[in-house]
Image: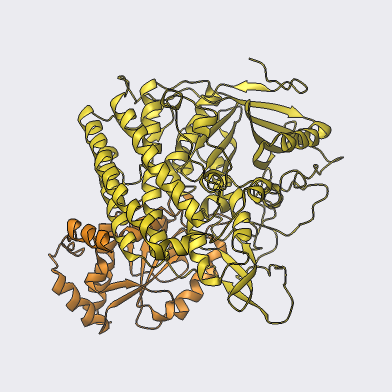
Chain colours: A orange, B yellow
């Protein structure tokens, strides 16, 4: 126990300031809290769905949970069921085998809901494109609010995209 | 150089590792498999090819890891004898590969116990996407996958738990069917193929000189290993040798990829055993590591940095020095954390004896790579067939025999330290010269192969170029093919709540398997 506490004290807090939203706004942590609360009336719960990715995007989404980004500190957390989620974070391309599972996950998510497509494959189908086995971009299967390009996008870009979706929803009064 | 087995005169492909290729007949096909199994050689991969009219149009291929190197054999098939002798009696891991080859290329074993489709869920709208001429639409499909006939376990109090394809976490999709009594798992049956996105068909549409980008996206966590294996295959087909510096830089990147994945897994394994502290610490180290990677190579995962002929960018000496110093920092931190993990009674209680694969079972099922080494299966290409620069570095193979989660954790710790040692040597002894050296002339009608020890195990790429230098067939093999079936055994007798921990300790690729 002592060694654990010593390690925690030695490392200290490494969390970095949150990035600005997509609209080049400087968003303070408190502001993000307020935005999320304004839109949802609660913290933001995200259900991640891998609809056929190469797992590169999953590595960077996982990195969002490290102490540098500390997204739980911003009131964002990943949940195990779409029924608990406000936002679906979907990576692609959507394989034919995952299309129905993705549609059902979308249907199981309560309104109001947001969908963010992550990565070049989620945005356009990427290098895999559309084929006998791939439906291509996420928006070919379910409606998408924000698409984050990159192969894979860095964690900070993913966070910007999530915040952009929340901000856009706030503006449109959803 | 001649191969020790001269019955079918295999020829050596020009590759940094000893790779041999030969054409066999049916008797040699089955004879080789029996002899290989008897010697304790391993089946690396099995796949189908359909070239259309050119003889031999349709064929089945197999690759074995032997003491003399990799032996790649092809058995031609024709309409008089459309099937091939089943390899599953000699190598258990052949079963799913044969089912996949049947789905994709339409080549079937003569007799096989299990004829269920594997990668094909009945939604492709075409019969065999890798058949020559290939994608004629058959009947229109619905949106629902076909029913998969899972093996039912019957008995008093037995019930099933169905998990997936969408999993409760930030992980890839697949389906697990548990048959349990109370909390105890009697049987697990996997159903994979959900992330099948037509990679091997897609290769045929891409120019050989840019298809390394696709290879680098077979499994994102092993992008360096796949990209290197593909480039090795293309360079081998074209008879091109890359500069010494390129070889060293590629090894440096491969070891950085290994360390990144091990750091991530060590944190996640702590977290799955309820030590959130471990995740916080190791994910911090992984982030430091990835940021340095980004600074040096311009990409956090090093995607597309390796390219045919060399590397897409040069790295200056100052950057190498930074990389070397980072190894010292990370080593210090990981030693502290290893002491904490080793001394934590609660953590060790979850790790030890959980998800055990005895060495005898591991040998019988062909468990490979990192998980294999935790069950006393000594196989590491960097030690067994050391190519440059590994020949000069004398890699120490980490080996444990307990075969439980604790052993897979211990192998990861050992390999982190060994890779950090290798990285320091690679940075310090980096040969001068150029890395950027583009491959311009493609060979025509040639075969090439790439074989690399990725962080999870051996990655293999078999490439065939056509008369115009275009890709006729590119087969990518992930060690997850061998290890997924063993996971079904590792869970037997354990409790359901330990499954995430056991699964994470293997950390197999869905995408690399499903293609």
Residue B6 visible to an observer of this rendering: yes
Quadrant containing the N terminus of chain B is top right
Q: Is residue A162 left or right of residue A130?
A: left
Q: Is residue B338 above or below residue B450?
A: below
Q: Is residue B398 above or below residue B23?
A: below
Residue under the point 29% across and 54% down: A154
Residue B447 or residue A44, whichever sits in front: A44
Which image quadrant for residue B392? top left
Residue B352 or residue B281, whichever sits in front: B352
Residue B305 visible to an observer of this rendering: no
Residue under the point 14% across and 67% down: A27
Residue B174 in the image: state x and y as whole percent: 55, 63
Residue B184 or residue A135, whichever sits in front: B184
Q: Is residue A68 above or below residue B336?
A: below
Q: Is residue B181 left or right of residue A30?
A: right
Residue B466 in the image: state x and y as whole percent: 61, 30
Residue pushed farthest top?
B1
Residue B133 in the image: state x and y as whole percent: 67, 44
Instruction: Report the number of numbered marks.
Output: 0
Residue B162 in the image: state x and y as whole percent: 59, 73
Which image quadrant for residue B293? top left
Residue under the point 63% across and 49% down: B362
Residue pushed farthest right?
B80
């Amino acid at each position: 126990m002592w060694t654990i506490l010593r390690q925690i004290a030695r490392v200290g807090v490494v969390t970095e300031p949150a990035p600005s939203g997509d609209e080049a706004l400087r968003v303070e942590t408190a502001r993000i809290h307020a935005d999320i609360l304004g839109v949802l009336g609660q913290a933001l719960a995200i259900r991640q769905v891998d609809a056929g990715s190469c797992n590169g995007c999953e590595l960077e989404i996982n990195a969002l949970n490290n102490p540098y980004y500390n997204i739980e500190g911003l009131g964002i957390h990943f949940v195990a069921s779409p029924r608990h989620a406000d936002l679906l974070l979907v990576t692609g391309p959507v394989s034919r085998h995952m299309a129905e599972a993705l549609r059902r996950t979308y249907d199981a998510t309560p309104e109001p809901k947001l969908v963010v497509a992550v990565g070049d494959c989620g945005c356009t189908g990427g290098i895999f494109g559309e084929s006998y086995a791939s439906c291509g971009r996420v928006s070919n299967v379910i409606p998408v609010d924000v698409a984050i390009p990159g192969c894979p996008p860095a964690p900070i870009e993913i966070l910007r995209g999530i915040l952009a979706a929340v901000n856009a929803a706030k503006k449109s009064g959803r | 150089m001649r191969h020790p087995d001269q019955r079918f005169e295999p020829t050596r492909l020009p590759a940094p590792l000893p790779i041999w290729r030969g054409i066999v007949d049916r008797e040699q096909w089955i004879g080789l498999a029996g002899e290989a199994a008897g010697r304790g050689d391993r089946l690396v991969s099995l796949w189908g090819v359909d070239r259309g009219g050119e003889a031999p149009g349709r064929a089945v291929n197999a690759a074995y890891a032997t003491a003399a190197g990799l032996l790649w054999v092809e058995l031609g098939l024709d309409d008089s004898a459309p099937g091939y002798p089943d390899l599953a009696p000699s190598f258990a891991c052949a079963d799913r590969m044969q089912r996949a080859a049947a789905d994709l290329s339409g080549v079937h074993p003569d007799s096989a116990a299990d004829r269920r489709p594997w990668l094909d869920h009945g939604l492709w709208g075409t019969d065999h996407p890798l058949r020559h001429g290939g994608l004629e639409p058959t009947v229109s499909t619905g949106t629902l996958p076909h029913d998969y006939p899972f093996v039912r376990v019957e008995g008093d109090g037995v019930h099933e738990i169905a998990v997936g394809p969408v999993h409760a976490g930030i992980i890839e999709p697949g389906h697990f069917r548990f048959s349990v009594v109370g909390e105890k798992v009697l049987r697990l049956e996997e159903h994979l193929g959900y992330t099948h996105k037509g990679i091997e068909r897609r290769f045929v549409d891409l120019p050989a000189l840019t298809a390394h980008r696709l290879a680098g996206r077979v499994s994102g966590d092993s992008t360096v290993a796949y990209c290197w294996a593909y480039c090795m295959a293309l360079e081998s087909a074209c008879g091109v040798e890359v500069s010494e510096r390129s070889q060293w830089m590629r090894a440096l990147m491969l070891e950085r990829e290994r360390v990144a994945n091990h750091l991530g897994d060590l944190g996640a394994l702590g977290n799955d055993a309820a030590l959130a502290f471990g995740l916080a610490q190791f994910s911090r180290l992984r982030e430091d590591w990835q940021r340095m990677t980004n600074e040096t190579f311009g990409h956090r995962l090093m995607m597309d940095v390796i390219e045919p002929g060399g590397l897409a960018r040069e790295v200056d000496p100052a950057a190498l020095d930074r990389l070397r110093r980072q190894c010292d920092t990370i080593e210090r931190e990981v030693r502290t954390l290893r002491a904490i993990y080793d001394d934590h009674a609660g953590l060790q209680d979850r790790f030890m004896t959980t998800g055990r694969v005895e060495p005898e079972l591991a040998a019988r099922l062909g468990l490979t790579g990192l998980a294999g080494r935790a069950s006393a299966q000594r196989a590491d290409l960097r030690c067994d067939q050391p190519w440059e620069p590994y020949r000069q570095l004398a890699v120490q193979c980490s080996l444990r025999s307990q075969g439980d989660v604790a052993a897979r954790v211990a192998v990861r710790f050992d390999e982190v330290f060994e890779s950090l040692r290798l990285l320091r040597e690679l940075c310090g002894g980096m040969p001068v010269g150029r890395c950027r050296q583009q491959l311009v002339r493609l060979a025509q009608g040639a075969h090439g192969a790439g074989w690399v020890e990725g962080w999870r195990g051996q990655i293999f790429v078999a490439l065939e170029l056509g008369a115009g230098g275009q890709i006729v067939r590119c087969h990518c093999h992930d060690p997850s093919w061998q290890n997924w079936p063993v996971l079904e055994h590792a869970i037997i007798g354990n409790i359901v709540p330990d499954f995430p921990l056991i699964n994470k300790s293997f950390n197999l690729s869905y995408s690399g398997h499903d293609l």
